[in-house]
Image: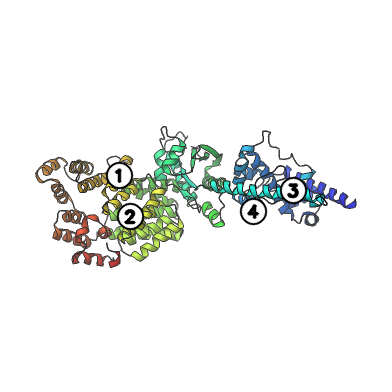
Amino acid sequence: MAVAGDQSQNAIFLQKLKMIILENLENEDFSVEELAELIGLSRSQLHRKLKSQRGLSISQFIREVRLEEALKMLKKDVATTSEIAYRCGFNSPSYFHKCFHKYFGYTPGEIKDHFRNQIADEEYNPLSDTGSDQSSISPAVKSETISLPVKTPEIDFGYFRGKRKLLWLFMSTFIILAVMSFIYLRYNATSDKRETSIAVLPFTNLSDKQENQFFADGIVEDLLFRLSKIDGFKVISRTSSDRYRNRNDKTIPQIGKELGVNYIIEGSIQRSDDHTRFNIQLIDANTDTQLWVKNFDRDMANIFDTQSEIAVNIATELNRFLSPEEEASINRHNTNNLRAFELYQLGNFELKKRTGLGYISGINFFEDAIKEDPKYARAYAGLAEIYLLMSLEGSIEVSRGRNQSEALAKRALEIDPSLAEAHTVLASIYTNIDFNWTKAEQEFRRAIALNPNYSAVYHYYSGFLSIQGKHQEARAQLNKALELDPLSFVIRYFSAHLYFNQGDFQNALAENQRCKEMLQDHPWSTWNDFEINYMLGNYDKALDAFKLYGLLTNEYPPSKADSIYKNEGPEGLLKMRIDYSEQPYLNARYYTLLGDRNKALESLQQSFDTGTPNPEISFDYFLRDLREDPRFLSILDKIGLKPEFRI
């Protein structure tokens, strides 16, 4: 009887401890000292008592009580996983996620999904269901049968002593149910394992000032950047998701299918002078089901901390464990200067226009951002990209643009060595200007390792591989870029370009049509249209594209094309293009098509002598008839292309 009395007293003692913890459940700062004081013992006395009765430290006991209550909330689906974490005194959803998985063997999301159809009607009360039978904290679920292989509660087989048949019946039934439960869980756990692919749609600007839309777009860009740091997440580029700014009648499932994602994030922002209100929703794109929603009312001074918090919450809701390195990366701010952040976003907006005026405006915005924050690495990388593009497109002298671009990219990496954008700029310099294939390969691989969600690096790496003659690998890399940015005009344009240079004109035409649907009457896709239709023998369509290009670029009078076409046929259009062109490499391509090998080789040599050689010489379809000529091979030698790289 004395033993039974002691057990009863122990149970009452443990129950009192549990009640105290439950009364302070949401207080993340509730300490071991406070618990000891409230129960009337010193910390050491409480520690010894818990060790003797439960084999636990005080902090372990507190954590287990919190986790047990979290389990009840998850079963009843009373709130999102992140909200339950905070309600149970965990100051980090990611830490709660780890503790829960370690204790029960399953993630909070798996538990929640399993019981979603069994939600109790009554309102949850954290101080209910705390009778004496619950006084001993156990990781097993005691209130109902759960078909999850969590830690199994101990069974007192002494009750069945002498009743062998009943015992064996019980054991057999128990084993069968356990096996069935395990199979059920494993099936469901694996059958619903979907790719964690995410798109963030443009946030709605609820502010009175229209210019705050740039701020909202910057917040989206920054959130995407943080999410891209999470291993296993596929994050769609803003270039593609931005096309749903005016969604019209498209549903979330339609958008999800077009972007190839399982999850979509929507949001709105209302900004005042020193205050911002966010509303963020995480949606299952397949079912249009809201998985998580939260409002954030924050001072502008804390805007970047809020971005980190949102990213961590989303990772938690999608059952993603974050490594310490990932958490550190998500919590690292590119800048703490709000004005610099806004200037950077404006610079990035101008950069993506890919126009001369856009480059000039972008330079001014990026330089102003750097003045605001001299350690803003992404601003240096953006500036480096503009100078690289200007040098490649002939807007500035090649060596000058190259040197400025390299210096800026290296400065960005001094500040933030993990910046994939800066490594990609260096890789492009070494590919297109220096022809240093070894260094280019190293920088491309480094950029991909640092940010597997950066679509541009796959795009540029694809070009690098094509130069090396590795066309299947090039297509595979470009397909990765298209997965991450399926509605990117630039990447689709290069995809058409790649098909063309492999002689696959039908696929090139289809891909170029997608480009025209994305951006009507763009010079790049218009000239593509001319070349593809020329090679397919669709000369009337080629003529239409030829005239439209002249109209769009003002490089030559479109009206002249009709008479030349009438008198000289399609070849006359090539001659007319050469007459108006100042680009030796482009002229070489058309001289080859016209059968003038000598002028073609002279033009290629001229492009090399003037510092504007194009490494695409190795796989350009128009130059295929020159590939055995010693003069052509000599140019390949000058840019360091080894024989095994040649087509």
Q: Sequence-wise, which precedes: disc 2 or disc 3?
A: 3
Describe the element under mark 1 as helix, strand or loop. helix
Mark 4 lies on residue: 102
Kindly give the residue lying farthest to the right in the view shown: 1
Amino acid on which disc 3 is placed: Leu
Residue 243 image point, x, y percent: 39, 40
**Labels 2 & 1 near each other (Cβ < 8 A):** no
Q: Sequence-wise, which precedes: disc 2 or disc 4?
A: 4
Describe the element under mark 4 as helix, strand or loop. helix
Mark 1 lies on residue: 510
Q: 3 above or below 252? A: below
Quadrant of the drawing holding the C terminus: bottom left
Mark 2 lies on residue: 387
Amino acid on which disc 1 is placed: Ala
Residue occupying image coordinates x 28% and y 61%: 399
Q: Sequence-wise, which precedes: disc 3 or disc 1?
A: 3
Q: Nearer the viewer, mark 3 or mark 1?
A: 3
The local crowd at label 3, few if under 14, some if 14 to 19, many if 20 or more residues have their Cα within 10 Å, is few
Q: Nearer the viewer, mark 2 or mark 3?
A: 3
**Looking at this view, is 56 or 150 the one in front?**
150
Mark 3 lies on residue: 169
Residue 45 image point, x, y percent: 81, 56
